[in-house]
Amino acid sequence: MLLHILVLAPFVAALLVALAGGKGVAASKIAIFFSAIFAALSVVLIAGGDLNAAPIDWFKLPGSEASVKYWLASNTLSAWMVFLSTVLTLVALISARSTIKCEYKNFAIGMLVLLGTLNGSFLSMDAVLFFFFFEAMVIPAAVLIASYGGANRKSAAMNFAIYTLVGSAPMCIALWYLVASSGVTTAADLFNYVQTMDPGMQSCIAIAFLIAFLVKTPIFPFHGWQAATYAEAPAALSAILTGAMSKVGVYGILVWVLAIFNLSEKTLAVMLVLGLVTAVYGALMALRGQDVKKILAFSSMGHLGLAVAGIFTFSPKMLPAVLVLLVGHGLSAGALFFLSGTAERMTGSRELSAMGGLTKVAPVFSFLFGAAGVLALAVPGTAGFVGEFLVLMSLWDVGPIPTLVGGFCLILSAGYMLRMIQGVLFGKRETAIVEEARISPLEGSAIGVLLALILVFGFHPAFIYEVRSTVVDTAVEQAAPAAEESAELNDEEVKALIDKMLAEEEAAAEKTDAAEQATAEPAVETAPVAAEPVAATATAEEAK
């Protein structure tokens, strides 16, 4: 019942918000009340361990004998991802009360629908059901961007929708072929069938799945939609995009690629290099950025690139490393996006050059922003420190070159984060701030809870990874033989692959600069003018 509530109740809550009267006061109370309940239930989900709901036949897939099932299950990984989506949605709805105002009802409806699709993606056990939610989440996100974003919100929403939907098209075709030919839809059964397929066909299907997840994360060179989307989206939505939606891509790689396909050593090596290149590219772009939200967007991209690189090391330390890194990043990046929206409202700009001097005029905001920035640096005692340190240890199991690249990214992250803190908080302020845009006590308290959680999980990370489901362990075991072969690549080969990707990155950066010069300076963000369960895993292990 708990799994069904977390997936279906957000849609019911959205309907109740739609039926609420008034100009938004009642809608805000209903939305925040239900979001708080969902956040509390996500904690219950984590404490309850692996859960498995009874499957319900949904429909027959046209052109095959496969029966698509409405089947939900949770494991440690999916439970923590649900925790991120529910907690960040609660804070987003609290924060939006200060920005959306008269249009709050429609915004809350979109956010609750988005929450339902996110939870559905993390808890679906049927491949077709997962893909349904995976694609459905694009619709409310795109509508919210187009309705409540900045000056270039419509083009950003269109770019986001086209990129993600087109990126998922190969997966749609590959999934239909796989399900139609096998007659099954669960990961365990698909794994059994894939073992009988031609290796070449198996690789093609696996790559189609990977492309969809790399676009959603995003990973270089499939990141073209990210910076503009995060910048133009309202800050509350940007926090969800980076803190929860981007995690669907990483989750998909772990649960719907590694748990089904036997990837070749070449594919594993390329994915490792892509993760490292993404980490370097994101850090460099953040270091040169002037738009606060774009700096945070590229920062998020860099951290997720490091997580993907960690996954494809297949080190024994990889699973706790990636899980802690994802949770820590979701909380810190979400908090920074919420606060960046407040800074934009107070100063009327997203540019670092137009900010500064906020410590004297907005001390509460300055304390929260400074604390969030320092915690995002992954200093000792934070969840980010534990996750990133374990990822570096995982990279060391592959070789010194990947470890040095990962360490270089962490040094760059300190540079751009301190630069952003200095630009937003310190210096001399020439103009007065918008007094009505100050952070509210409720919003400040909600963000403070996020920062406190980062410290709690940093001092005791076992809260996150001590209870692990066997689903991801099984996926790693299945990919381990190829991973061992890919680990035999020497440092020169890895360096050559990285050099090649960095050259492509440089060209992409020049293209981005040219596009930004041709674009007008963005306007201030204002109110709009317009996983697998134990049962399935056991089946896969028996098949092996």
Image (spheres, rainbow, N blue to C red):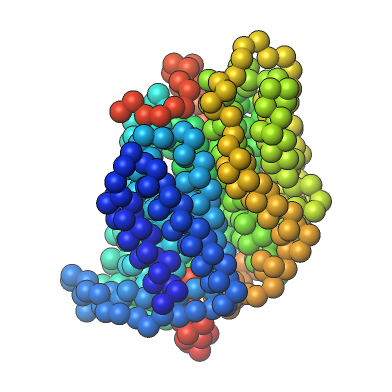
Q: Residue furthest right?
A: 380
Above or below residue 543? Residue 59 is above
Which residue: 33% across, 51% down? 17
Q: In this orientation, which residue lies closer to the viewer: 391 or 448?
A: 448
Above or below residue 196? Residue 542 is below
Above or below residue 481? Residue 20 is above
Q: Residue furthest top?
A: 430
Q: Residue furthest bottom?
A: 542
Which residue: 54% across, 55% down? 87
Which residue: 78% across, 59% down? 459
Q: Is residue 358 visible?
A: yes
Which residue: 21% across, 75% down? 60
Percent coordinates x, y for residue 267 in the rendering: 53, 59
Percent coordinates x, y for residue 253 in the rendering: 50, 61
Percent coordinates x, y for residue 30 in the rendering: 40, 53
Question: Which image quadrant is residue 335 in?
Answer: top right
Q: Is residue 394 visible?
A: no
Q: Is residue 208 left or right of residue 426?
A: left
Question: Which image quadrant is residue 365 in?
Answer: top right
Question: Which image quadrant is residue 393 in?
Answer: bottom right
Q: In this orientation, which residue lies closer to the viewer: 194 or 213?
A: 213
Above or below residue 349? Residue 200 is below
